[in-house]
Image (tube, helix red, strand yellow):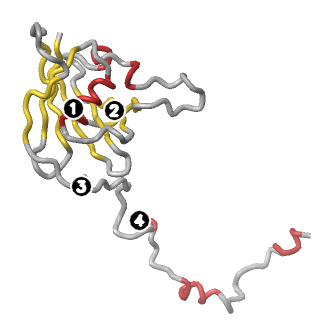
Amino acid sequence: MVYKFRVILDAEEDIFRDIAILEDDTLEDLHNAIFNAFGFDGMEVASFYTCDETWNQEDEIPLFDTGDVPGEQRTMGDYPLSSILDKENTKIIYVYDFINMWTFLVELAAIEDQIAGAPYPETLFSHGEMPDEAIEKNFEADMHDDIYGEFEDDLDEDDLDMFEDDDSFEDYGFEENWN
């Protein structure tokens, strides 16, 4: 069978490629097809990420084994496409070049019979020109407008001066406890 993917660059404008690839090919083969379809040189590190139906990132599948014990971590070459993607699980995220963070939404659009003699993988359709730079990603947690968030009490160092000459606080002999 042939998997047909729509690979969409996460960008302001519509930029995507439709790629056909055999279901028994690996994620590494899909990685190669994607960077070729978008005109990258393939010299950068990349990873796929499994995700849910709303594109929430889950598990990383790296190009290279980056684990502490060599051979312990599974890589793109260890996963045939059919082991990760099917009619129910159609989405995966692809990140190329961790400096620039080129991010792609990869969706399985169709599963069809293989055409005899057709070259796979193949770029079926190309729409949009690649920008010079990836859009900047913001990996910050949502916070209030200030660094203290909801815990701001509107007090500063000057406010604490009001306790300096106040003898109403009982001395518990704290210094004595350090001897």
The amino acid type found where label 3 is placed reads: Glu
- Return the disc, 3 or 2, that comes first in the chain's sequence: 2
Q: Which residue has dot 3 on it?
A: 133
**Residue topped by disc 2:** 48
Q: Residues within 10 Å of mark 1 (few under 14, many from 20)?
A: many
Q: Earlier in the sequence, mark 4 or mark 3?
A: 3
Instruction: Using a 10 Å C-alpha cutoff, classify the residue at mark 4 as few (fewer than 14 neighbours), some (14 to 19) or many (20 or more).
Output: few
Distance (Cα) linking label 1 and label 3: 20 Å
Amino acid type for the residue under numbered disc 2: Phe
Cα distance, mark 1 to mark 4? 36 Å
Residue type indicated by callout 1: Val
Identify the secondary structure beneath mark 1: strand
Q: Is residue 66 above or below residue 22?
A: below
Cα distance in 3D space between marks 3 and 2: 20 Å
Give the label, 3 or 2, closer to the camera. Answer: 3
Q: CA distance from mark 2 to mark 1?
A: 9 Å
Residue at image coords 46%, 74%: 153
Secondary structure beneath dot 3 equals loop
CA separation in Å, label 4 and label 3: 33 Å
Give the class, few, some or many, for how many residues have Cα within 10 Å of label 2's Cα (few <14, many ≥20): many
Q: First in sequence, mark 1 or 3: give its number.
A: 1
Looking at the image, which residue is at 13% across and 28% down? 123
Residue 113, above or below 84: above
In the picture, the quarter occupied by the N terminus is top left
Residue 69, percent from left and from top: 60, 27
Q: Which residue is mark 1?
A: 106
Q: Quadrant of residue 41?
A: top left
Secondary structure under tag 4 reads helix
Residue topped by disc 4: 149
